[in-house]
Image (cartoon, rainbow, N blue to C red):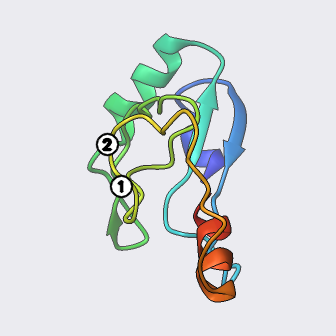
Amino acid sequence: MTDLLSAAGTIVDVYLPTDRETGRPRGFAFVQFSSETEAAAAIRLFNARELGGRRLKVNAAEARPPGTDGPHPFRSAGPPPASRPFKTKGSRRGLRARKRSL
């Protein structure tokens, strides 16, 4: 893969994310070129090209805002509360659940 993409320019870094459970590659990669023009050339040359019977999709990575891993299914989308009032009454099970949710 790096041999193929190096035709567009100098590759600085390659990152292949792996699946946590199986340890196998997830099917995509992040490739960093030494300049923006080389990255644009790689997109132009290799997007929609077939490799090993599969069509490649080559595009520029979108930057994520720092500290976000996407929407959390159990939390609201708004800003986190400044401080939560902690109730001391209740069962031990409820107390543990409240501590976990902080």
Please state, as top left, top right, bottom left or bottom right, where the N terminus lies in the image: bottom right
The residue that mark 2 highlights is 47
Looking at the picture, how far across and down is residue 31, in whole percent?
A: 59, 39
Q: Which of 41 and 31 is in front in this view?
A: 31
Mark 1 lies on a secondary structure that is loop
Give the x, y percent position of residue 23: 71, 79
Name the element at disc 2: loop
Query: Which one is in front, 60 or 69?
Result: 69
Q: In this view, does 63 lie above or below 47?
A: above
Q: Residue 48 carries which label?
A: none
State left or right for residue 16 relative to residue 48: right
Kindly identify which numbered label has been placed on residue 56: 1
Amino acid type assigned to the residue bearing label 2 in the image: Asn
Q: How many labels does the image show?
A: 2
Q: Can residue 24 be seen in this view?
A: no
With respect to residue 56, does 94 lie above or below? below
Give me the residue at 50% from left, 58% from top: 28
Relative placement, left or right, of 62 versus 27 is: left
